[in-house]
Amino acid sequence: MVKVGLTGGIGAGKSEVSRLLASYGAVIVDADKIAREVVEPGTPGLAAVVEKFGGDVLTPDGTLDRPKLGGIVFADPEKLKALNEIVHPLVGARSAELEASAGPDAVVVHDVPLLTENGLAPLYDLVVVVDAAPQTQLDRLVRLRGMAEDEVKARMAAQATREQRLAVADLVIDNDGPLEDLEPQVRAVWERLRGA
């Protein structure tokens, strides 16, 4: 088994790289997806978030109001730290379960947005960073996701810098260009991972 950490800043295109790797046969362990699962209604994770941040972070149907919580935590590093202290151990435990169920010849790709920020690079055999210029990230998030520019800048500021991510990279996928330039790079990375 090859354990790969996949990361990149918001809007860099990590989700598309993850999708391509899955299509080639990688086992994807998506930390964001798991982070949503561990705070679903009825979970200990959601109960802990409500205890810390109050019932105002719930929608009327009792689910987590992610945009509201995001607005709170991305504007305050201490609150972001408190949220991470609740969610990260739960995500880690579920990720370990998924990895353990993969076969011995599997390439297991852990899609981890905050890999650099949380010092997780040593947990993986290789770290792949999806890289894009900050202006490209900003443009994609405003244009394609409809996010407000100030919200994008706050989220980018809460993440590791481009330089910090590149410093932990074993392999870099340059996603500053058009989508059609991405697939050949991801295919080449896949071939490297299969041979690792």
Image (cartoon, rainbow, N blue to C red):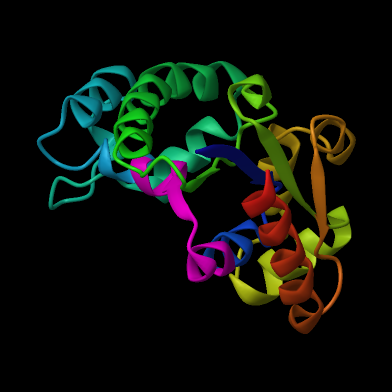
Question: Left or right: where does residue 195 sit relative to residue 63?
Answer: right
Residue 101 vs residue 172: left or right? left
The residue sitting at 80% across, 37% down in the picture is: 169
The residue range painted magenta reads 20-34
Q: Is residue 137 above or below residue 70?
A: below
Residue 81 point in image, percent of width and height: 53, 18
Q: Residue at x 71, y 47 (%)?
A: 9
User: Residue 44: x, y in percent?
Assistant: 17, 24
Q: Is residue 168 magenta?
A: no
The residue drawn where x is 29% and y is 39% is 101
Residue 164 location in percent, x, y? 84, 30
Q: Is 139 above or below relative to 32?
A: below
Residue 31 colored in magenta in the image? yes
Horizontal and vertical percent position of residue 127: 70, 38
Quarter of the rendering containing residue 3: top right
Q: In the image, 105: left or right of 133?
A: left
Corner quadrant of residue 148: bottom right
- Judge whether residue 12 can be spotted in this image: no
Q: Quadrant of the C terminus?
A: top right
